[in-house]
Amino acid sequence: MLEHPSAIPSYLDPNHLGPWGTFLQQVDRVTPYLGPLSRWVETLKRPKRILIVDVPIALDDGTVTHFEGYRVHHNLSRGPGKGGVRFHQDVTLSEVMALAAWMSIKNAAVNVPYGGAKGGIRVDPRDLTLGELERMTRRYTSEINLLIGPQTDIPAPDVNTNEQIMAWMMDTYSMNQGKTATGVVTGKPISLGGSLGRHDATGHGVFVMSGEAALRLGIDIVGARVIVQGFGNVGGVAARLFADAGAKVIAVQDHTGTIFAGGGVDTRALQAHVDSTGGVAGFHGAEAIANDAFWGIETEFLIPAALEGQINEHNAQRIRAKVVVEGANGPTTTGADDILHDRGVLVIPDVIANAGGVTVSYFEWVQDFSSFFWSEEEINQRLDRIMREAFTVIWGVAEEHKISLRTAAFVVACTRILRAREVRGLYP
Ligand code: GLU
């Protein structure tokens, strides 16, 4: 209960710390550029709906344990909800709200016809057996059945979720519906209506956006230095594409440690090492360095591709990168964003830098509806075109108003969302 009618719930408080607080600050920054549409801006500061679910499962030893899960619809003005599902021990409601909100902005920034949604379960999936993971995924899917559907809300992979988890989600939803509904999730295996190119799409998009920035800043990708935090589906793929293009991936950090090789690491050998050991630590083709030293490495590109809040007031001052390309969602706090801006470091914000994933998710969803599948070449061509167009439009807005790329991306996205909000009107 609110103590006073004018008291605001804590999650709507702009001083609230954490990812949702960061999102609220980002919205406040963009409001002066929204003109008459700013009268609708409060819409963006309140998620449309939040579902918190209990996810009980029987462990292999017979005991029953409970997890807390979430699915948040941030804004559905432009279309059905779209966004991933994250399994991580640090998942909180504030985080899922922010991630859902960033999906609204991302989908509008690259102009795919979706609203923003996100889900998650607070769990360390490494603690579960495969059978337990399947039971948890299926029970969670049944619990969020209220919200998901091919025309209403379409989940996808995110941190620690993958094609297999999407297959279980699709099967659970389909069994409950009594018919196969491939379009209920994206990021599925190819054998179940998944799309070619989806697995690499986010890393691919990070690479394309980096190339757009390099063109404008006069950086040659050949010989450029790259450092990457996170070597999963985003960081690992982006690193490989950079190396294939002639860049040098000189440092990689993940939850197991940090490695450095001035001449560049062999990204395929590193991927094989990570696949077999679970992390970059112990890789023979590079030296181990202290985690904190990662942030001070001189480089052309820094790609944070792990979790939120990694670039913050404590390390932003030390960063010696020309361009930060946000492969992760929300890796830079607002304070750090300002420090980087003042120091002339270009930040390609998450909402465009990592939008390749949801863009190919959109292609997957369209292909599922028509049951007609495109070639990988067609997919990558369409992906490149959407990414480049988004970058060009947002770069133009940033130049015009002398604002950061993040604020420009928010201007473009919020304008699209709030225009839809306005013409739809309020009902009832
Ligand atoms: N989880 C990814 C993201 O944060 C992909 C979402 C999707 O494909 O729907 O953008």
Image (tube, helix red, strand yellow):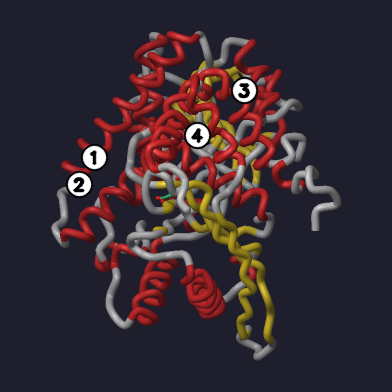
Q: Which residue is mark 1?
A: 380
Q: Which residue is mark 4?
A: 350
Q: Residue at x 52, y 40 (%)?
A: 102
Mark 3: which amino acid?
Answer: Ile
Q: Which residue is mark 2?
A: 376
Q: Look at the numbered disc 4 and give the secondary structure of its residue.
A: helix
Reading the chain from its start, which is encountered first: label 3 or label 4? 3
User: Which quadrant: the N terminus?
Assistant: bottom right
Q: Which residue is mark 3?
A: 297
Mark 3 or mark 1, whichever is nearer to me: 1
Asked if labels 4 and 3 touch by Cβ distance under 8 angstroms, the answer is no
Pick whichever, 246 or 44, lies toward us.
44
Q: Residue at x 63, y 23 (%)?
A: 337
Mark 2: which amino acid?
Answer: Glu
Examine the rendering and report whether any part of residue 224 can be seen. yes
- Distance of mark 3 from mark 1, alpha carbons? 32 Å
Pick whichever, 208 or 363, lies toward us.
363
Q: Is residue 383 above or below residue 276?
A: above
Q: Residue at x 33, y 41 (%)?
A: 112
Mark 1: which amino acid?
Answer: Asn
Reading the chain from its start, which is encountered first: label 2 or label 4? 4
Q: Position of residue 219 (x, y in %)?
A: 40, 13
Examine the rendering and report whether any part of residue 226 can be seen. no
On whether ligand 1 comes within 8 Å of the CB at mark 3, the answer is: no
